[in-house]
Image (cartoon, rainbow, N blue to C red):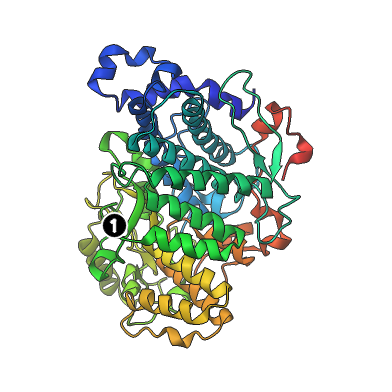
């Protein structure tokens, strides 16, 4: 039985797990959670919404799916993992070992590794669950209501989102390959016996399905009840997914139009908001994000465990995450985002991979023990870390807990208005609509830098270099850098970054994606072994 089929067989089990944490009292009284069948769970609009609520949690929470591993916890893991592989988040030491193999490019190139298995398996779980809702409504006798449109809109959006994650990760990039012949991922619709899977469709075919799904999602959400909260996929979020799909395809006109619709009504953050820690979906820019429930948190597998310098876990205490020094040094002094990293933080970790940690004697920025220790104490006091936390030059303070120095959960942000601005600017630049791109870039840039002047970027090449810079700073740590390299066909090169080659090894430099198939994740070996439609000859 392949992974896709396993996700269908596990669907009834998952419904029990998902519904048991969110059922209404009436439903529980009529159907105990240990006896809920798929038929019951999909029997009404309200019950289908409960299934969606479970998916909302699965985006960020520990993977409790049958057959998967909780050590790779949805977007909480994969957002920082993709940035560790894509050059955004730089590790300053091996820490406790978590993600070291990711940044060394050893995980996604190994078909037996948990990372490639869970990424594939979790996304096909979203597809299977979405299929169940879509097929049930299609085959049933449900009255069209705003609430039913909400359910269907989110189901179609989740299916499009999952296929986009899969095809951009397990196949050659659309803009650098031959999408009509390049192998993508299986497209599956069935939710009933005999649970037939499928061979790998072409990249072009997968994109066609994604585009159809996201347009269906938008059509339903335009006539739907309002999203209950930002964990739910709203109409704006669906437009954001559409913009991402179009951007990765090089469909610039669609990307620009969808991004503008996605950000409509979401104000750019001001300075105090931007520097507040990115720890809540209540920020004005957040279009879509996981509103983390205390009882459902990941604790030592959470997003903040990987990215926040204040989280009280061994990953952060021993391994402060840093920005590329080359990128940081490009940020103007008049840009308030420069405060989100600390270039002069003392290197207090004896195990720092650059060999300069442990004392003022090895840290070139300090001349005395007193100066060295005072600098650390000031950082600890300012940001609320524990005395056991290490510091490191260029360390991030972009992501800060609401309750620093603890393991308390914080929200996970998936989509912000800033991303949509930058998608639209990139698309306008690629269409050679220079004045329109400059106008929007001025609006965005001036919100961050008091001296910003977009007229400095007068043609497509200059605009694109500025987009790359802005995405690198604005979206640092938010999971985009790996796929940005693919879209731009740029090599990965940690020269002039502060990363230690002894730590990064093969991940220190990777040739551009058009010339290097290691940018394409391996299909899980478990899928090849079990799926009769995929053989070893189909492996990336």
Residue 309: % across, % down: 33, 57
15 shown above or below 420? above
Instruction: Name which residue lies at 64% across and 27% down.
Output: 2
216 shown above or below 55? below
Instruction: Name which residue lies at 47% across and 77% down.
Output: 437
In depth, the one of 359 and 476 nearer the eye is: 476
In depth, the one of 473 and 201 nearer the eye is: 201
35 shown above or below 131? above
Residue 252: % across, % down: 56, 65
207 shown above or below 485? above
- Tell me the element at label 1: loop
For this view, does 149 lie left or right of residue 28?
right
In the image as oriented, which residue stretches furthest toward the right? 537
Q: How crowded is mark 1: few (under 14 residues within 10 Å), some or many (20 or more)?
A: many
In depth, the one of 384 and 526 nearer the eye is: 526
Disc 1 target residue: 400
Instruction: Name which residue lies at 71% across and 58% down.
Output: 177
């Amino acid at each position: 039985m392949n992974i896709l089929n396993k996700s269908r067989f596990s669907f009834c089990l998952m419904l029990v797990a998902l519904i048991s944490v969110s059922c209404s009292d009436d439903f529980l009284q009529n159907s105990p959670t240990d006896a809920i069948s798929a038929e019951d769970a999909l029997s009404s609009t309200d019950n289908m919404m409960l299934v969606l609520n479970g998916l909302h949690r699965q985006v960020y929470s520990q993977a409790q799916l049958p057959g998967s591993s909780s050590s790779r916890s949805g977007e909480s893991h994969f957002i920082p993992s993709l940035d560790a592989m894509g050059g955004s988040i730089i590790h300053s030491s091996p820490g406790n070992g978590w993600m070291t193999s990711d940044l060394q490019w050893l995980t996604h190139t190994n078909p037996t590794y948990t990372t490639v298995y869970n990424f594939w398996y979790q996304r096909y779980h979203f597809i299977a669950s979405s299929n169940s809702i879509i097929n049930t409504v299609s085959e049933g006798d449900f009255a069209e209501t705003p609430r039913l449109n909400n359910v269907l809109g989110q189901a179609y959006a989740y299916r499009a989102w999952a296929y986009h994650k899969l095809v951009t990760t397990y196949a050659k990039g659309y803009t650098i390959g031959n999408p009509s012949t390049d192998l993508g991922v299986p497209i599956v619709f069935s939710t009933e016996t005999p649970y037939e899977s499928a061979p790998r469709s072409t990249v072009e075919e997968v994109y066609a399905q994604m585009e159809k799904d996201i347009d269906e999602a938008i059509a339903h959400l335009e006539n739907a009840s309002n999203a209950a909260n930002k964990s739910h996929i709203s109409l704006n979020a669906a437009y954001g997914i559409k913009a991402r799909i179009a951007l990765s395809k090089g469909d610039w006109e669609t990307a620009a139009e969808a991004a503008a619709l996605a950000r409509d009504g979401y104000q750019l953050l001001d300075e105090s908001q931007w520097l507040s820690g990115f720890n809540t979906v209540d920020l004005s820019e957040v279009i879509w994000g996981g509103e983390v429930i205390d009882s459902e948190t990941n604790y030592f597998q959470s997003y903040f465990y990987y990215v926040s310098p204040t989280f009280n876990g061994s990953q952060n205490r021993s391994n402060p995450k840093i920005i590329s020094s080359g990128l940081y040094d490009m940020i103007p002094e008049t840009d308030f985002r420069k405060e989100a990293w600390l270039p002069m933080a003392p290197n207090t970790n004896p195990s720092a991979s650059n060999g300069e940690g442990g004392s003022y004697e090895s840290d070139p920025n300090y001349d005395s023990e007193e100066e060295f220790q005072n600098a650390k104490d000031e950082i600890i006091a300012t940001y609320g870390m524990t005395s056991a936390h290490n510091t490191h030059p260029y360390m991030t303070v972009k992501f800060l807990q609401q309750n620093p120095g603890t393991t308390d959960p914080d929200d996970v942000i998936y989509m912000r208005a800033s991303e949509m601005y930058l998608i639209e600017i990139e698309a306008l630049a690629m269409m050679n609509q220079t004045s329109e791109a400059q106008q929007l870039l001025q609006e965005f840039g001036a919100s961050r830098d008091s001296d910003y002047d977009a007229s400095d970027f007068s043609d497509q090449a200059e605009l694109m270099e500025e987009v790359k810079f802005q995405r690198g700073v604005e979206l640092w740590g938010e999971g985009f850098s790996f796929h940005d390299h693919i879209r731009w066909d740029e090599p990965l090169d940690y020269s002039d970054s502060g990363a230690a080659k002894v730590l990064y090894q093969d991940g220190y430099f990777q040739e551009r994606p058009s010339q290097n198939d290691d940018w394409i994740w391996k299909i899980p070996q478990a899928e090849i072994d079990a799926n009769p439609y995929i053989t070893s000859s189909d492996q990336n």
